[in-house]
Image: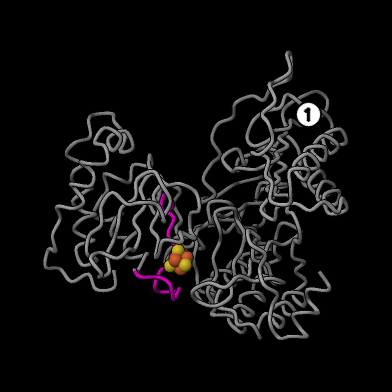
Amino acid sequence: MRGDAETTRATGSPPALRRGACPTLAAPMQTGDGLLARLRPASGFFTAAAFLDLLDAAEAFGSGRLDITARGNLQIRGLRAESVAPLSAAVARAGIVPCEGIAVEVPPLAGLDPSEWADPRPLARKLAERIADSGLDLAPKLAVIVDGGGRLHLDGVAADIKLVAGAADPRPVWHLLVAGRPTGVSGSVDAMIEAAMSVVADIAAYGSAARARDLPAEPLPPGSSSLALREAAMSPVGRFDLGASVVLGVAPAFGQMAAHIVRPLILAAVAEGVSAVRLAPGRAILLVGPAGWNTSVLVSLAASLGFVVHAGDPALRIDACAGQAGCASGRIDTHAVASHLIAHAPALMDGSLDLHVSGCAKGCARPRVADLTLVAMSCDGRPGLSIVLGGRAGDSPVATKRLEDGPSAITALGQRVAETVEKGESAAACLQRLGPARIAAAFSAARFNGIDHAGL
Ligand code: SF4
């Protein structure tokens, strides 16, 4: 990595991002609003002071806009080639050591939550060191998780390799999953590091772009230990009384925030004794405060600053990218579309659907398939809004409307579902029953309703 940093300083330009790689401080990614660098602290948290320094640096060297990704990484937007090296220096001065190479992720409350089976961090550190020392040429997006359980366990987060703690006397036992499948392999920390490294080597043998899904699926050995099914993880938004600490989770709308909006929240949190900031899958900020912390004042402040403070807020159900407000490639105001969806199509917001709003076909906010995607596309050579079912932003839409008809189309689809849904039926089941043709018809029939939705 030193070589990369020296290259950056010597040429004034960050090195090109390897295809399929994750953008880092050393190799940021070109986006519609400049370079983007992703940052994950090796420690798993930021001190509150370091996070404030980072906000200053994001404003000084970037556009001041930051994202929290679906996996809980921080992205700093709007960098220029010549501002990347000064940003790296500012990060170092703040005492933040970025995670380099393959990250081994742990739940965001790791080590704080008394309900976890085991603190996963020591195992995660050892495994990360072993992977780094192996010298294997691995896919940059290879995902490795060590999950000790607890309120915000990572069952819902995909990984190539997962070690999951389960109950056993006298110590917890760790179970190995590969590509989401149980392997029946379980054991102590040391044994599972060897087991995980064996899988890492198997993956590497398939090439530098290989993932665990490329491995042949092995049948479970007879009599192998199994993992107990767990309840779904809680939302990261809310108050967590963890005994020795209280953690408050809030979420910037659609995971995007401006440094000058977050700063007053962090400053107020510090005044209330918050010492650390963690980022969580689900695009949330976790403020780690003292035992017995009464979070009500901070919740009110966060709400007034536009943060989501209730776990049931429908905004948490929608993945939306920066759109035209923060990205030169954006053709729609994604936040306005998402807000219209929430306000005017409540029948779609029952929590059964994964919803995605994208400013262009690239689909940055959700590379995975969504049940329903609204994406900016051309309509007869003019700006349009398309609906994609069960696909990605770049997939073929079932219908496209002119942009000015977009709000009416969303409202009409919501009304169609509200009129069609049967008692006890979810929106997802209703859409399934309606099928693509009738969904497209509902979306397409809408006409401009005379209300100016400029910017949508
Ligand atoms: S998907 Fe959104 S953030 Fe990504 S390039 Fe397109 S408009 Fe920009």
Magenta stretch in the rendered image:
316-331
The total number of labels drawn is 1
Q: Is residue 150 left or right of residue 356?
A: right
Judged from the image, the secondary structure of the residue bearing numbered disc 1 is strand
Q: Residue 322 magenta-drawn?
A: yes
Check the picture and name the quadrant holding the N terminus.
bottom right
Choose between 420 and 264: the one closer to the eye: 420
Quick check: 137 above or below 118? below
Q: Residue furthest top?
A: 223
Residue 108 screen position, x and y as percent:
65, 50
Q: Image point 27% across, 48% down: which residue?
A: 346
Q: Quadrant of residue 231?
A: top right
* Residue 253 in view: no
Residue 187 visible from this viewpoint: yes
On screen, 331 above or below 151? below
Mark 1: amino acid: Val
Q: Is residue 190 shown left or right of residue 165?
A: right
Q: Quadrant of residue 402?
A: bottom left
Q: Nearer the viewer, residue 433 or 450?
A: 433
Find disc 1 in the rendering and name its residue: 173
Q: Which quadrant does the C terminus fall into?
A: bottom left
Q: Residue 22's quadrant in the figure?
A: bottom right
Residue 325 image point, x, y percent: 40, 74
Identify the residue at horizontal 48%, vertical 58% (top origin): 365
